[in-house]
Image (cartoon, rainbow, N blue to C red):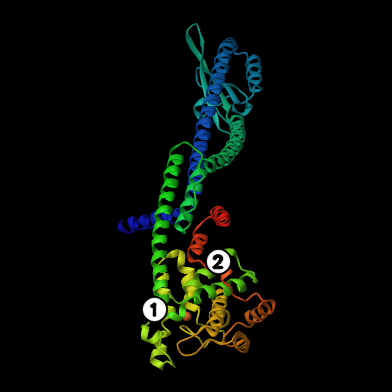
Amino acid sequence: MEDRGERRKNLLLRVEEGLSSFSLKVKMTILFSLLLLLFGAITLNVVLNYQKRVLLKAMKEKGDLLTRNMARNAAHALLTNNKLELSVLVNTLKKTADVEYCAIVDHRGIVQMHSDIRMIGKSAKLGVGSPQEGSDIIQFVAPITHQRKRIGTVYLALSTKDMKTQLNRFKLNLTFFIVLFVLMGCGILAWLISLFLKPLEKLSSAAHEVGDGNLNVQADVKSKDEVGQLAITFNQMVINLNSAYSEIEEGYLQAVQSLAMAVEAKDRYTKGHCDRVVFYSTVIAQNLDISEKEIVELQLASQLHDIGKIGVPEAVLNKPGRLEPSEMKIIQKHPVIGYRILSPARFLRGVAKLVLEHHERFDGKGYPDGKRGEEISLLSRILCLADTFDALTSDRPYRKGMPLEKSISIILENRGTQFDPKLVDLFWTLVKRGEMEYSNQKKDQCLLIKHLIHLRATEEEVKNLEETAEKE
Ligand SMILES: [Fe+2]
């Protein structure tokens, strides 16, 4: 018993698991279709039983009537022993539809006349019927009386064969119509359910998007029922969440900005460097098939790429002359520190990855992970080139800034080793076109807050901001 109970429990669990993988629409369609099917089966059963009762009742009424008439008509012929008249009566009755056999028995129980002549003269006690094979019959009996005295009996048998054929035909037709009705019903139900669940699906899709981090989404539900009310509450909740999230992001970015300023204050050689790196990386990216959003991400990463230097002692950062290997190790930690500072903010995660990779080399000899080739993202490869180019032209604690020509030739020499060869080719083309010349007039595109606005704002907001900036 316990085993059976356990098996039933497991089966129910499996059914529950199976059903949970279906959507609400499918589950409701299955449920209502099953109910419709059940309704169809019950209707079929009820109608068939009713039809059978009606046909049986009609047959009994017919049998009773025929038997009583026969008994009335046969009284005189039986009394006078008129075999011819009895024969005419029996054979006429036999020709009536559904009559299987007909017999007239006298008061002694001897069959005086029968539709089957072989039965004449036999005792009624041995049975008066000789139904055809496979034929179900209903037998009717009526007394033949004369002056209130019983002088014989009429036996009549009606075959139910035709009735059953009629009933089967009816069953077939009814089944066809019910199946058609159930199929059409299922289709209409599926359509109605899909219509009713559409607002719920829209709400669910919006909730998914919010779950994926898109806080600019609104559930477009126009119905005024409970789902509509829920959508209004949901939309308001998302607006509030977006506003709270923006405040947190803004606060986080201000903190990051303060850290970036602290790095500039700490490392005097960094001053202006970030703005120039933003400029160089932007010029390179704009000449590649890179989306506007990615360019903004690259600009922000260029601005913040050395933020990890906040964790490097000032004595190491500003040390004149060559660094000891142990000091090199300390300074090489700054991409990882930068990544740790930026990555907790979800909107800065892409930027954090670029900061982490900005000292990786195309030949795999960079740090912190020694990634090579296209393992390093394209934006990080651009950032690496822009950062190095500006570092070469700027003053460093251990050397003076190099002349532009010398810096360019070093970049070209490191084609395929430190830098992506395709990017070096593009860089050389841009240098020849004079597009890599940094000027203060172009500096405004490097403002940190502008990157933040671009990264967070919608397209319409960006357009408005740009228009305002142009007017100013
Ligand atoms: Fe760096």
Determine the residue positioned at 47% across, 84% down: 367
Q: Which mark is residue 205?
A: none
Determine the residue positioned at 42% across, 60% down: 250
**What's the residue type where badge 2 is placed?**
Gln
Determine the residue positioned at 50% across, 74% down: 274
Which of disc 2 and disc 1 is earlier in sequence?
A: 1
How many numbered circles does the render carry?
A: 2
The quadrant the C terminus occupies is bottom right
Quick one: 418 or 34, which is closer to the camera? 418
**What's the residue type where badge 1 is placed?**
Lys
- Determine which residue is flagged by label 1: 266
Q: Which mark is residue 445?
A: 2
Location of residue 318 in the rendering, given as x and y in whole percent from the top left corner: 41, 85
Quick one: 143 or 422, which is closer to the camera? 422
Q: Give the answer, above or below, for where 440 lies relative to 61.
A: below
Q: Quadrant of residue 438?
A: bottom right
Q: Give the answer, above or below, for where 241 lies relative to 175.
A: below
